[in-house]
Amino acid sequence: MKIGKYLTLFCVGGSAYVGLELMYRGRSHISMFGAGGLCFLLLGRLRRRPISVPAKLGAGAGTITAVELATGLLVNRNFAVWDYRGQPGNFLGQVCPMFTALWVPISAAGMALYGWAEAGLDRLSGHQSI
C-alpha cells in the first residue's frame, strides 16, 4: 500500500497546486501537477520534523520555491508557463520574494491537508499514521 499511498498523496498535491493556479491565474500547465505533487510529498515529510512551526513554515516556503525554480529552469525557459521577470527581487524570472512569502500560508495549508489525507488513507487501509 505504501507506493499506492504516496502516489495518491502525490496526485492530491498535484491537483491542489493546479487548482490554486486555476483560481489565481485562470490557467495552469501540466508541469505544475508534477511540481505540486512533489511539493506535497516534501511538505508531508517536513511536517514530521521535530522543529518549531515557524521553522516548518519557512522551510516549506523554501522547499516550494526550490521546486518552482527547478521546474522553471526545466520547463519554463521561454516564460510561457509563468514570468516573474517584472517582480522585484526575482531570480532568473522563475522565482521571486512575493511568491516565496505566499508559500508560507500555502505550506501551512499543505501540511494540514497532508495530515488529513494521510490519516484518511491509513484508515482506509487499516494502518495508522505516525
Image (tube, helix red, strand yellow):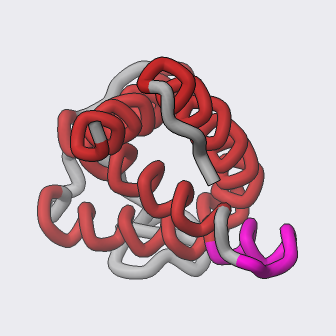
Q: Is residue 33 visible?
A: no
Q: Is residue 67 visible?
A: yes
Determine whether, in the image, residue 5 is placed left or right of residue 54: left
Displayed quadrant of residue 75: bottom left
Q: Residue furthest front?
A: 126
Determine whether, in the image, residue 110 is placed left or right of residue 81: right
How far across and how far down the image is residue 104, in percent?
73, 59
How far across and how far down the image is residue 7, in percent?
26, 38
Determine whether, in the image, residue 26 is placed left or right of residue 51: left
The answer to which of 7 and 109 lies nearer the viewer is 7
Determine whether, in the image, residue 24 is placed left or right of residue 101: left
The residue that appears at 66% across and 49% down in the rendered structure is 111
The residue that appears at 64% across and 35% down in the rendered structure is 113
Relative height, residue 77 to residue 83 (above, below): below
The answer to which of 111 and 85 lies nearer the viewer is 111
In the image, which residues are magenta? Answer: 50-59
The answer to which of 121 and 85 lies nearer the viewer is 121
Question: Is residue 56 within the magenta segment?
Answer: yes
The answer to which of 73 and 40 lies nearer the viewer is 40
* Quarter of the image where the C terminus is located: bottom right
Relative height, residue 4 to residue 93 (above, below): above
How far across and how far down the image is residue 42, in percent?
46, 62
* Quarter of the image where the N terminus is located: top left
Majority secondary structure of the magenta segment? Answer: helix
Displayed quadrant of residue 59: bottom right
